[in-house]
Amino acid sequence: MLTAASTAMIVTMAVFMVISGLSVVLRLYLRRRKRITLKADDYFVIAAWFFSAALAITNIVGVPVGGFGVPFEQFDDAQAERFLKMLFILQFWYIIAVALAKLSILFLYGRVFGIGRFPISVLTLIGITTSWLISFLFATFFQVWPLRCNWVACIPTTDYAVMYVLSSVTDIVIDICILGLPAFFIRKLHLNGNQKIGLIGIFGLGVFCVVSSIARLAYTILFHKVNVKGNYAINFSMNIIMWSGIEVCASTLCASLPCFGPLISHFHRITPLTATITSFMSIGTNEPTRTASKGASMHSPYASRENILGFETRTDNVIKGASSQDTSKGSEINIELGSIRVDNSFNINSS
């Protein structure tokens, strides 16, 4: 008969795995509907979901096979070995899944906020995240040696609790840096306050990922306080295992949320804010709607700025203040993209 902890593990993991999977499917559907070619951030989030699902499935299978939810001291030797083997495996799923979700968000930032190249701040966080991934993969693999000592009685060579706390703290710090990055770029855009707040809010939806990371850290610190070195599994809280699964699924979900901008215009009347969010989230089209900007240089910062703000709005481009006889280069015109105004410099060819 399943314990309450075992039932909670199965239900929670199944729900979060399905929700995160649906978010990825919806993201890909919107990409296809808008005829947007898949980019690196899309492939990273797909990979992140597979590893998230692997962790969730490991947790679910761990209930009947590994005894997840049953007090460790009630295991016989064979059950204890199965439990520890599954625990060892899911640590790798966790590290890879959260890192891939972070990389997906960062590559999205690089594509959205970069003008011809990735911003230095984004490249720096990509490097930090990659280093975090490699470091903790090696630390986990060599946390105790020989390898079989992860599931048979040996004298540990690693303080497990300290390593878990360190990975959780660094994970949260990186998440906070990633969440704060959009505000740095959005404040430079020529948008009003409400539009800026709306865009920051869209990118800030990943805060739930940080909340789940903090919950996992809280249980990890509790584990650190009660840990008995040399027999760590006795006090290994099931809450750490469950919240690890919640965090990886939440990370995958949050990585896809900024791509759901087109849904806003589908279900709501177009307003200055929804038009901004919709156009901002439609980045990556093969053929951006840029009727009025046909003569603009695609390599100029201004053209790239328009590529950020004007991609797939359903609006008419209105050129004001430019006569059909104006053939001068660099004429300053205003293009109105729905409720978004973009000042730009173009070459206007005579008809």
Image: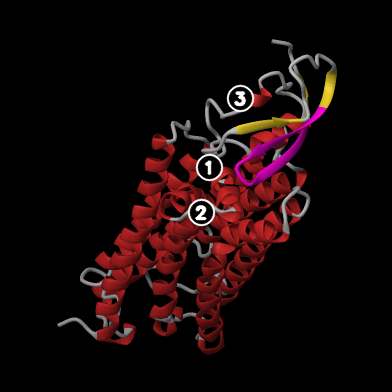
Q: Which residue is mark 3?
A: 291
Q: Earlier in the sequence, mark 2 or mark 1?
A: 1
- Return the x and y of residue 285 as percentages of the image width and height: 53, 31
Q: So how many labels did they put on this image?
A: 3
Give the secondary structure at mark 3.
Answer: helix
Disc 3/disc 2 C-alpha distance (Å): 32 Å
Q: Secondary structure at mark 1?
A: helix
Q: Which residues are magenta?
A: 332-344
Circles 2 and 1 in contact, beta carbons < 8 Å:
yes
Q: What quarter of the picture does the C terminus occupy? A: top right
Q: Can residue 91 be seen? A: no
Identify which amino acid the numbered label 3 is placed on. Thr
The amino acid sitting under disc 1 is: Asp
Q: Is residue 73 above or below residue 191?
A: below
Give 324 or 266, whichever is nearer the viewer.
324
**Residue 273 figure quarter:** bottom right
Q: Which mark is residue 23?
A: none
Query: Could you say where residue 336 lies in the image, as x and y percent from the top left?
Result: 67, 38
- What is the number of the mark on residue 41? 1
Say few, some or many: other residues with alpha carbon within 10 Å of mark 2 (under 14 / 14 to 19 / 20 or more): many
Residue 4 placement (x, y as % from top left): 26, 85
Tell whether label 1 touches label 3 (CB within 8 Å).
no
Please tell me which residue is depicted at 38% across the width and 79% down the height of the picture.
238
Q: Is residue 179 left or right of residue 148?
A: right
In primary-sequence order, the first of circles 3 and 1 is 1
The residue that label 2 is drawn on is: 255
Q: Residue at x 81, y 14 (%)?
A: 327
Amino acid under label 2?
Ala
